Image (tube, rainbow, N blue to C red):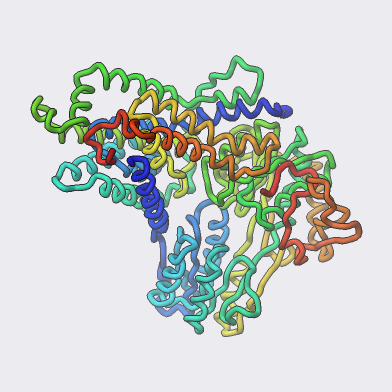
Amino acid sequence: MSAFFSVTRRQMLAASAAGLASSVVGAGQSSAADAAATVGFVYVGPRDDYGYNQSHAEGAAALKKIPGIKVVEQENVPETVDVAKTMEAMINLEGASLLFPTSFGYFNPFMLDAAKKYPSVQFRHCGGLWTDKDPKNAGSYFGYIGVCQYLNGVVAGHMTKSKKLAFVAAKPIPQVLLNVNSFLLGARTVDPSITCSVIFTGEWSLAVKEAEATNALLDQGADVVTCHVDSPKVVVQTAAGRGAYVCGYHANQAPLAGDKYLTGAEWNWATVYEMFAKKFLAKEPLPNFVRGGLAEGFVKMSPLGPAVSDAARADFKLKYAEVSKPDFAIVKGPLKDNKGAVVVAAGKAYGERAIELESMNYLVDGVVGSTS
Amino acid sequence: MTGGIGWWGLPIAMLGGAIRVSTPFLFVSLGETVTERSGRINLGLEGILVFGAMSAYAVAVRTGSPWTGVAAAALSGALFGALHGWICKFPKVNDVAIGIALMLFGSGLAFFFGKPYIQPAAPHLPAMSLGAWSSIPQLRAALEVNALFPAGIAAAFVLRWALRDTRAGLALRVVGDSSEAARALGIDADRVRLAATCFGGAMAAVGGAYLSLYYPGSWNENISSGQGLMAVALVIFARWNPIGCVAASLLFGGAGALGPALQSVGITHGYYLFYAAPYVLTLGAMIASSAPGRAGAGAPAELSIGT
């Protein structure tokens, strides 16, 4: 009886703990009462997490410099009805007329419902899910960051001595798999014998498990680590603390890893937000579907760290020019997955805008790991 | 870091994981053992742990000394414990409900005050290299032991001795098993429980300090993945016995390292299943220990978890 009772109580605890996760901090520094437009940003985590949320907050910070724009922000908003409440509050209490809910899970149904309810407010969601059937005052934007992980891989390929790379990943979804595959394929342009072990933690943010995964990968001899989790802080600090090189993700983690930081794949959302804000102020129609990569300035690379060798620097420069060409493709045939099946036939090439990449469900030959 | 060690990585990773991951569980469950032996249950330890993690990190950033951070965490935890103990002494107050409120309060307060400390890096607690004798770098890494881990083990033995063989331990057990008997002996049950809850809070906050100052060693709002809650379950699993807490924490930590370690040696299928290993183990132990006739064996009679 006691066990049964304590289980139900624990479930209740879990439910109430989920409710507390949202804390209201740091909204609305009102710059001018006569701001022409109030822009709202909603983040799923803390905006100074050295990761995904920080990359968006850096974009929001760029908007604060534009005259006539007032920025309101709220962080730690779960992908639940909480985000609907946050958006309502921003619209009704702060007068926001352009909203950027930045997390993937905010889109359906929360943002779509809000867009139907407030037809005069513009909504743009980060993630690229918008289709023609959705409300016209809503839309999506996203960046192609695969080439940046490819360039990470190029530098990692030069710097690894053990020929083993490590990738700490959250969930085996297409975008993450593309990053893992791109990282390895970049490294294999340097040396085709390089392998990359991947560990999936199963969640976007699990500090202890990310540290355990990093340690386990280093124990197996990997000497360059990168990741795709919401906040790379723990992975970067753990790896650098054990003397391994690090390639960053989402934002610049060089301050955390010192000279162990090689380079990193970063978002550059300021490009997108400034474009939207300027059109909005000029009363021009906002595009519904926006995507871009390195060439469009949606993503960027961290400056190369001091440890990067001259050979790696030269090759990085070369490959950077290569990936900036419009017909460049990371994923091209003949390509096998790590179970031996041919996933891309010879002669086929998928550039970063190819729709085929958005249903990627395999890890390429050379990646040690499994998607399930 | 030259070359992998293949399958040897598995036991080494589990050993390392047991040492690295178990410490917060150990501290929280030891503290809660004392609290529960006094007849109170404090479910707010998760909140106290998170607040302890934050205050330790913040003080370490400010003063540059991680040990001052640990001390500050212990103090903050004792204060939270005192709050719980003080409120619960009033008649008809439900300690379970207060615990839940305290959990939300502690986490919320930690998030509020912790905002400015997400970015700065705090000095870490030093580690002792117990693996210096080995030539295997992986084993050396696994045996990088933080001083709090042996301190926790030592605390478990001291607590077992104190509970069994000291006057204070006797008073605590009497209060936990029967308030009436305690009153007949002239023991002030409320004061004993207040002290026990303070101690439990301080221990939980030190567990939090370990998270933010050693492993994983950073402060953010997701630093705890429910260690404070799981540790309360581990106390029941450990049958309110400090030595049992050590075993339960080590088992839980080692099982938690299984998932990443298996993936790193190439067993990559079904990792969600391996990640569930600690919880499956706990659930199995709970079911086994709630068998008819054994339900609540060792539980303090005054404890309001119902037996």
Q: Position of residue B117 (x, y in %)?
A: 43, 47
Measured from the top left, where is residue A20 in percent x and y? 38, 55
B68 left or right of A321 in image: left
Residue at 63% of width from left, 46% of height from top?
A: A200
Q: In terms of depth relative to the viewer, which is nearer, A175 or B30?
A: B30
Q: Residue furthest top?
A: B133
Residue A281: tell me if it is visible.
Answer: yes
| Residue at the front extreme of this rendering | B292
Q: Residue at x 12, y 32 (%)?
A: B180
Q: Could you tell me if residue B59 is visible in this image?
A: no
Residue at the image position 38 percent from the left and 29 percent from the top? B238
Residue at far right of view? A347
- In the rendered image, the quadrant that contains the N terminus of chain A is top left
Q: Position of residue A110 (x, y in %)?
A: 50, 70
Would you identify the image quadrant in which residue A308 lies?
Answer: top right
Front-lying residue, A323 or B250: B250
A208 w.r.t. B3: above or below: below
Quadrant housing residue B191: top left
Query: Residue A55 appears at what percent x and percent y?
Result: 57, 58
- Tally the numbered discs: 0
Q: Nearer the viewer, residue B242 or A155?
A: B242
Residue B166 vs A321, above or below: the answer is above
* Residue for point 63% across, 61% down: A268
